[in-house]
Amino acid sequence: MTEIKVIGQGLPGMPWEEKPQGCGSVVWRHRANPIIGRNPSPNCARVFNSGVVPWKGGYAGVFRADHRDGTARLHAGFSADGLKWDIRDEAILWKDESGADYQPRYAYDPRVVLLEGRFYVVWCCDFSGASLGLGVTEDFEAFVRLENPSYPYNRNGVLFPRRVGGKYLMLHRPSDPAHTPFGDIFLSESPDLVHWGRHRKVMSRGGSGWWQGTKIGAGAVPIETSEGWLLFYHGVSGTCNGYVYSFGAAILDLERPSKVLYRTRDCLLAPEEAYETTGFVPNVAFPCATLCDAPSGRIAIYYGAADTFVALAYAKADELVAYVKANSELLPGDAEDFRQ
Ligand code: BMA
């Protein structure tokens, strides 16, 4: 195996379990999944599809919490070990840059990234329909909403953890106002997190398998490695009973991440366990965050399960990257800096 280096900080205390004996996959589940069950606080009926980061020797996160009225909100949460989470019962109350209160009508699927010393949150919010929201916090107490990075309709916005070529980069998935029966991953860049342009298509749905045939969307913040940016992404298959969400991984070019170097032909994890197949929306495994210990290459993947639970899975960067390289299938345009 070539030596694969993860670029980033050490996180030796992060959640981790060795691969179970006999497991034939490069991604394996946490034994005590799900780590967040139903009704974790009086206001929150279901918590899933959420962003977590290392914070103050422990962990903090922004969580998608569907309230008892069925509406999605964002809540802050804290954990000493990354496994037991204390989810705030009250939704985040955003301020805009002038200091005025701002409360989105709904808010879901947050991703959180530490970028230049501050924590940025990208989520899906209402802007005459589903669109991306962008905000920032330094302490997970005060949250400031910034300029809208997209116009409707868009979802699955994921910021890179550093500038590339001097520019901020965001992956996103143009969509429709409903449950979007299509979708590819795009990349836009910005000099200031306000003006976005130089749009490129990163990767398309499809391939020889069906698991990513209907749509795909960026999952967790990309992990920088010596082989390229490691991106977990979800893929959706259409069935007679609705969509099925699984996930795979891709490796994007370090200098020009609109170019895909490798992507998994088969999914890495498909809904199989009861907490993935049974819930508010059955058959959903939706990754939104990772923790990574760079020196050991240990990766913990946080994913929403059945739009009801938060679950964890693990991978080793060297084994995973080697697998993605050896089992890759690119689609037309994936390898290019595509703007046709
Ligand atoms: C997508 C989003 C996700 C959800 C998924 C499956 O459109 O709404 O939050 O996990 O559908 O319901």
Image (spheres, helix red, strand yellow):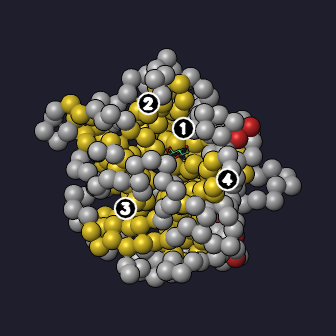
Q: Is residue 21 left or right of residue 253?
A: right
Q: x, y percentage for residue 76?
A: 41, 32
Give the structural element (helix, strand or loop) at label 4. strand
Q: Which residue is mark 2?
A: 71
At x 29% / y 56%, what residue is drawn? 150
Q: Residues within 10 Å of mark 1 (few under 14, many from 20)?
A: many
Name the residue that disc number 1 marks.
Answer: 48
Q: Earlier in the sequence, mark 3 or mark 4?
A: 3
Mark 3 touches mark 1? (CB < 8 Å): no
Q: Residue at label 4?
A: 239
**In the rendered image of this protein, does residue 22 appear above or below residue 66?**
below
Please tell me which residue is depicted at 69% across the width and 68% down the height of the picture. 209
Determine which of the numbered discs, if any, sits on residue 181 in the image.
Answer: none
Mark 1 C-beta to ligand 1 under 8 Å? yes
Q: Looking at the picture, does residue 264 appear above or below residue 90?
A: below
Tell me which numbered mark, 4 or 1, is placed earlier along the sequence. Answer: 1
- Residue placed under numbered mark 3 in the picture: 170
> In the picture, which quadrant includes the N terminus?
bottom right
